[in-house]
Amino acid sequence: MLGMPLHNIRNILKMVNLDCIQEVEVNCSWILPILTQFTPYLGQMRNLQRLHLSHVDVSHYVSTKQKEFVTQFTSQFLKLHYLQELYMNSVSFLEGHLDQLLSCLKTPLKILAITNCVLLESDLRHLSQCPSVSQLKTLDLRGIRLANLCLVPLQVLLGKVAGTLEYLGLDDCGIVDSQVSTILPALSRCFELTTFSFCGNPISMATLENLLCHTIRLNNLCLELYPAPRDSYDAGGTLCWRRFAQLRAELMGRVRDLRHPKRILFCTDYCADCGNRTFYGLEVDQCCC
């Protein structure tokens, strides 16, 4: 449903048995009235296993209309008894309402991706308490601004999924040094973790070393993605390549004294010219663009 007008989608949905649909992706900028018309169809997809909802912005509607839509939308999840994967990217109505959605989940999720959304601390708390996320294999929170939030709920959540979690994405969450220590004990017990992505968080060399030390016992970890430490940048935010190379060399020695990593990459901030990041391995001259 990538940008397709609703009347076309409605015609298609009338031609198929909605019970047979197992995967739905909605990626378009529908206005609230159109979303409201689509919502009842979602509840009829009783065998749906994967739902991807992207770029839904209802923030400019009055709060009463928003609340009505959130209630109508989330209530459809009560009928989705086979849902295993839920992806929500740039969805504005989750802020302050995540508990409504979570309380309607009837089955354990394997994948939960809430990315580039605004969440409140109360949303994180409800997430950590939700029974349906206790068996997650993938938790992706990229682009959720966590800088001013208490991360104890995230610590609780990581502790809950430590026995099953294989992928953890915390890129561009704005996590700072003082917050990292909160999640380290739980993170170090995620023994099934194979991929940990932590790019774009402004942490120091000391915190990065501490983080790497806490992943020592994670023997299944195949890929680790970290930001270049803030010590690599000058006061104006420009990466100092010589300093970055020096710090990577120090990290290489430190990590290999502790364990034999499979693949660790460090990424720079987004380039102002091309908009891309550059990834570097532990070796001083190793670039993984």
Image (tube, helix red, strand yellow):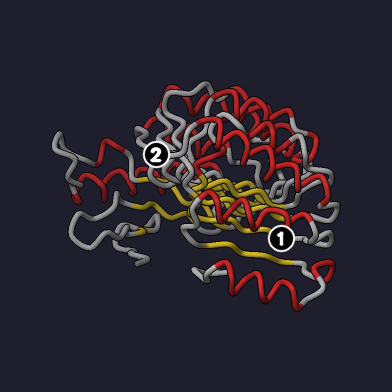
Measured from the top left, where is residue 229 in percent x and y?
33, 40
Inspect this view and state whether residue 240 appears: yes
Tag 1's secondary structure?
strand
For the view shown, which residue lies furthest in the left direction? 236
74 relative to 177 in the view: left or right:
right
Measured from the top left, where is residue 277 in percent x and y?
32, 57
Q: How crowded is mark 2: few (under 14 residues within 10 Å), some or many (20 or more)?
A: many
Q: Which of marks 1 and 2 is in front?
A: 1
- Residue drawn at (44%, 41%), measured in percent from left and top? 254
Residue underneath mark 2: 201
Query: Residue 288 is drawn in which quadrant?
Result: bottom left
Measured from the top left, where is residue 251 in percent x and y?
39, 44
| Mark drawn on residue 176 | none
- Residue drawn at (34%, 32%), measured in percent from left and top? 204
Residue sitting nearer the eye, 72 or 136: 72
Query: Residue 157 is drawn in which quadrant?
Result: top right
Q: What residue type is labelled 2?
A: Asn
Residue underneath mark 1: 50
132 relative to 96 in the view: left or right:
right
Q: In this view, does 146 lie above or below 166?
A: above
Q: In this view, does 12 lie above or below 269?
A: below
Measured from the top left, where is residue 127 in percent x and y?
67, 32
Tag 2's secondary structure?
loop
Residue sitting nearer the eye, 32 or 225: 32
- Residue drawn at (20%, 47%), measured in percent from left and top? 239
